[in-house]
Image (spheres, rainbow, N blue to C red):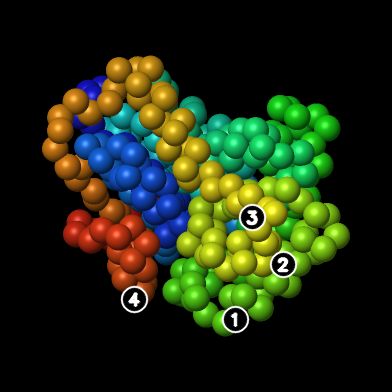
């Protein structure tokens, strides 16, 4: 494995671009390969067996691209199929957003809210991971099934988003009085302004995409695998389908053109 090899990032859809954005900002010389399984989204309402099968297909695709590290930029996959990724990856470093988000939340808070897809919430992955670090932490969870389709449709600043978000989140503010809120799905940073507006100034919003990138830097540094060449990174985006709004939403969020976009099949 060479230090000039690309970093692999994958998600069920567009949300993992939040991780790509962090890498682009903090590691501008690194090449990135992004895979989004848009044709089969959402993962959050599918069975564990199906998620594991889709994950195996995706990881095999990334390994063919000779990636030097893999980031699971999907909380649902991190919750129920991380073992599948680890088995296939071998000695290649694997970073997942749940571990990253857990460490960040435990560092600043004892009353923690988690919002995520139904599959992530039902897995109990976040509370279990948090209590391993802080057994006395109070953890409150909420499945927000409609957020992913809203983001994928480009309803990032639509009035309907705020109405739905208030329905999901108001109880965490009024009843549980949490100190921090973990965005337990990589789609959610795209709507973080609306979420922060509802939660108020006293709640710290935690984006696991940022902490996952920090963990990536640490692992690449430890393995002496940072790209030594001072050239701008090359970014390649592979998807299983291209919705009408994908490129526009992606470029708006990344603040960078998506020039290499290719549809592939991994089945």
Q: Quadrant of residue 146?
A: bottom right
Pick the front one: 264 or 1: 1
Q: What residue sits 28% from the left and 54% below the top?
A: 237
Q: Which numbered marker is on residue 244?
A: 4
Which residue is under mark 1? 160
**Which of the two marks, 3 or 2, is nearer to us in this view?**
2
* 3 or 4: tag closer to the N-terminus: 3
User: Distance between the Cα atoms at labels 1 and 2?
Assistant: 13 Å
CA gap, disc 3 and disc 4? 25 Å
Would you name the residue on which mark 2 appears? Answer: 168
In three-dimensional space, the C-alpha distance between marks 4 and 2, rounded to whole angstroms, equals 28 Å
Q: Position of residue 257 (x, y in %)?
A: 23, 61
Q: CA distance from mark 3 to mark 2?
A: 11 Å
Pinpoint residue 152: horizontal percent, then vertical percent: 46, 69
Would you name the residue on which mark 3 appears?
116
Looking at the image, which residue is at 64% across and 50% down? 204
Secondary structure beneath label 2: helix
Quadrant where the N terminus sits is top left
Q: Earlier in the sequence, mark 1 or mark 2?
A: 1
Q: Secondary structure at mark 1?
A: helix
Q: Which numbered disc, 3 or 2, marks the residue that appears first in the sequence?
A: 3
- Marks 1 and 2 in Cβ contact (< 8 Å): no
């Amino acid at each position: 494995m060479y230090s000039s090899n690309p970093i692999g990032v994958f998600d069920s859809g567009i949300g993992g671009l939040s991780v790509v954005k962090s890498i682009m900002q903090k590691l501008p010389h690194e090449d990135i390969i992004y895979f989004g399984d848009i044709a089969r989204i959402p993962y959050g309402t599918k069975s564990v067996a199906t998620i594991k099968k889709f994950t195996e297909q995706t990881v095999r695709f990334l390994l063919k691209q000779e990636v030097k590290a893999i980031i699971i930029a999907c909380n649902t996959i991190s919750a129920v199929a991380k073992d599948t990724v680890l088995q296939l990856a071998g000695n290649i470093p694997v970073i997942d957003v749940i571990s990253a988000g857990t460490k960040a939340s435990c560092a600043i808070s004892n009353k923690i809210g988690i919002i995520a897809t139904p599959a992530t919430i039902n897995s109990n992955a976040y509370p279990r991971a948090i209590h391993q670090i802080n057994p006395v932490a109070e953890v409150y969870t909420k499945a927000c099934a409609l957020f992913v389709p809203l983001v994928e449709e480009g309803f990032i600043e639509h009035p309907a988003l705020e109405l739905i978000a208030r329905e999901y989140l108001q109880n965490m503010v009024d009843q549980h009085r949490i100190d921090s809120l973990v965005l337990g799905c990589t789609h959610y940073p795209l709507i973080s302004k609306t979420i922060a507006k509802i939660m108020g100034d006293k709640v710290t919003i935690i984006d696991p995409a940022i902490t996952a990138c920090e963990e990536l830097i640490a692992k690449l540094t430890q393995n002496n695998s940072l790209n030594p060449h001072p050239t701008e990174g090359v970014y390649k985006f592979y998807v299983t389908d291209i919705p009408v709004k994908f490129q526009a939403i992606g470029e708006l969020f990344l603040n960078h053109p998506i020039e290499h976009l290719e549809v592939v099949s991994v089945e």
